[in-house]
Amino acid sequence: MTPDDIWLAPAEWLPPTTEKTADALATGRVTTDEADAMGYGQLPASPDLSAPQMAVRAARHALSRAGVPAGDLAAVLHAWTYHQGHDFWSPAHYVAARIGALNAIPTGVQQMCNGAAAALRTAAHQLAARPGDGPVLVTTADRFAPPGFDRWGGDYGVWYGDGATAAVVGAGPTGVPEGALTLCALHTRAAPELESAHRDTGAFHPAPHIRSVAVDVRRTKKAFLAEHGKQRFLDRLRQETTAVLAAALTEAGIGTGGHRLSAVLLPRLGRATARKVYGPAVAEVTDAPLADLGENTGHLGAGDLLSNLAALSADTGPHRLERGEYAAVLSAGAGFTWSAVVVRRT
């Protein structure tokens, strides 16, 4: 359950430099079949800025949109999936320090690609438990740079883009920023028995990148699917997606005799995954149109959810919600965890 008066003002920051799918095809980094399955044209790629540095930029944008001084924040929650630039360090504290949130409690949130939903859920719980506290800032950031990560070929059916997202999350009927979204529902489900899909089952390692220089998600997924079966795995993904979306829609009053959804925004995992998993799963509970906004971003690690919310709250754009309209945003992460968020433009 979420309180009735939670609002969020989301933003994103993407590096201006990109790697084009056409170039990846020309150099053999991807095949024609892979490009057709994804349907994405480019990936943002940071040539220099680390993930936390990008998070600072997204955070400043979100604070500016919300009109909230950094010194008023009660907490900074930072989520990520991959290396943050240093081996033994707290990126959440870095973000808080750099934006001037010196009164906030910084916390790292680790739930892989569902990290934004986990952080948003934590923010909502804090605001409900401590109504006198100030707003909470949620940030995400990832940089999938070589040699440690191959953004084009390190995983099956996922292309990874660099970037950062942020959202100021507050509570109360007054002081709601222009363009903010009301959080109508947020539901999460997990299946921890599936964690080995991203684990090297042969051994635990004493340090990163012992098995290979670059992260090799294909190796662990291949072993997992060989043991558990691809169709069984896809069925479970669809079932969990349907269940978490249905729960969120029920809480938000979406459905027969209730409000209607303008759209369901998907994790940015490509055309094939949308067709095989999300299309059938969503159709079980709503006929709202689906939208995959990954054409120019790819998968942003922990950031897909907030990037999609930023598109809904934008001042202009094809996915901007009008006042009073509702949308659902889906999220998923290794482990596995699934979340569904329902928002309304205030």
Image (spheres, grey):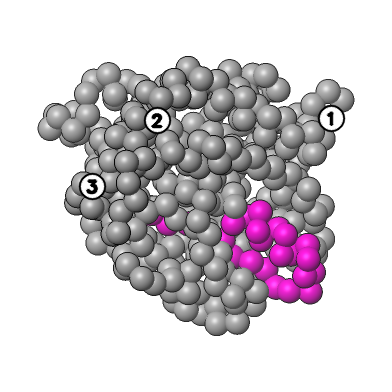
Disc 2, SS: helix
In the image, 131 versus 311, the foreground residue is 131
Asked whether the beta carbons under mark 2 and mark 3 sit within 8 Å of each other, the answer is no
- Dot 2 alpha-carbon crowd within 10 angstroms: few under 14, some 14 to 19, many 20 or more: many
First in sequence: mark 3 vs mark 1: 3
First in sequence: mark 2 vs mark 3: 3
- From mark 2 to mark 1, how far is it between C-alphas? 41 Å
Q: Residue 258 carries which label?
A: 1
Write the residue at 32% across / 20% down: 36
User: To which residue does mark 3 refer?
Assistant: 211
Write the residue at 34% across / 58% down: 83
Q: Where is residue 298 in the image (x, y as percent from the top left)?
A: 38, 39
User: To which residue does mark 2 refer?
Assistant: 224
Disc 1, SS: loop
Q: Where is residue 335 in the image (x, y as percent from the top left)?
A: 50, 42
Residue reaching furthest to the right: 257
Looking at the image, is 127 positioned above or below residue 16?
A: below
State which mark lies toward you, 3 or 1. 3
Disc 3, SS: loop
- From mark 3 to mark 1, how far is it between C-alphas? 53 Å
Task: Give the residue type that dot 3 points to.
Answer: Arg
**What is the quadrant of residue 265 in the picture?**
top right
- From mark 2 to mark 3, how far is it between C-alphas? 17 Å
**What is the quadrant of residue 222 in the picture?**
top left
**What is the quadrant of residue 328 in the picture?**
top right
Q: Where is residue 241 in the image (x, y as percent from the top left)?
A: 61, 30
Magenta segment boundaries in residue numbering? 119-142
- Dot 1 alpha-carbon crowd within 10 angstroms: few under 14, some 14 to 19, many 20 or more: few
243 lies left or right of 216: right
Task: Give the residue type that dot 2 points to.
Answer: Phe
